[in-house]
Amino acid sequence: IDPKLHGLIIGPKGSVINALKQKTGVSINFPNPASESRRIQLSGTKNGIKAAKAAIKFISQYRYSPLVNPNLTHREIPVPAEKMGLVIGPKASTRRHIEGNTKAKIQCPSRGDE
């Protein structure tokens, strides 16, 4: 896991990591920041480690975890590249309007990610 994402996994005042530890029963240790290691160490039961690993991968990709935030969800909706501008709108106005009215967060791929 990219060290730049460790703070996201830890969360404000350790809230995310503490919730993960509590819900999975797993001990979670990050590498020393001075180290070149990118490996997060997990210790616990096989099922606990499996759940913690899945949650950490999900957090690193989607910026939240349903294990920690059960009221949040994630959906991917295919939008043809030629229609992406309609979703975003001029100066991202349509996107901001949708996000403001629905409390949803819209993430659009970069042109190179299409």
Image: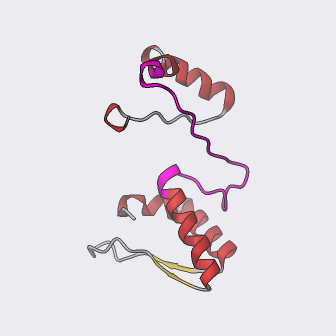
Residue at 62 percent of width and 86 percent of height: 45
Residue at 60 percent of width and 83 percent of height: 46
Residue 71 relative to residue 15: left or right: right
Residue nearest the observer in this picture, 58 or 103: 58
- Judging from the image, the colouring scheme is secondary structure
Residue 92 relative to residue 110: left or right: right
Residue 95 in picture, x, y percent from top left: 53, 24
Quadrant where the N terminus is found in the figure = bottom left
Residue at 53 percent of width and 70 percent of height: 53
Residue nearest the observer in this picture, 32 or 74: 74
Which segment did they paint magenta?
60-84
| Residue 95 inside the magenta-drawn segment | no
Q: In the picture, residue 69 is in which quadrant?
A: bottom right
Residue 71 in picture, x, y percent from top left: 73, 50
Quadrant where the C terminus is found in the figure = top left
Total count of labels: 0
Residue 109 in picture, x, y percent from top left: 42, 35
Residue pushed farthest top? 90
Magenta: main secondary structure equals: loop
Residue 52 in picture, x, y percent from top left: 58, 71
Residue pushed farthest right? 71
| Residue 62 inside the magenta-drawn segment | yes
Q: In the picture, residue 91 is in which quadrant?
A: top left
Residue nearest the observer in this picture, 105 or 112: 112
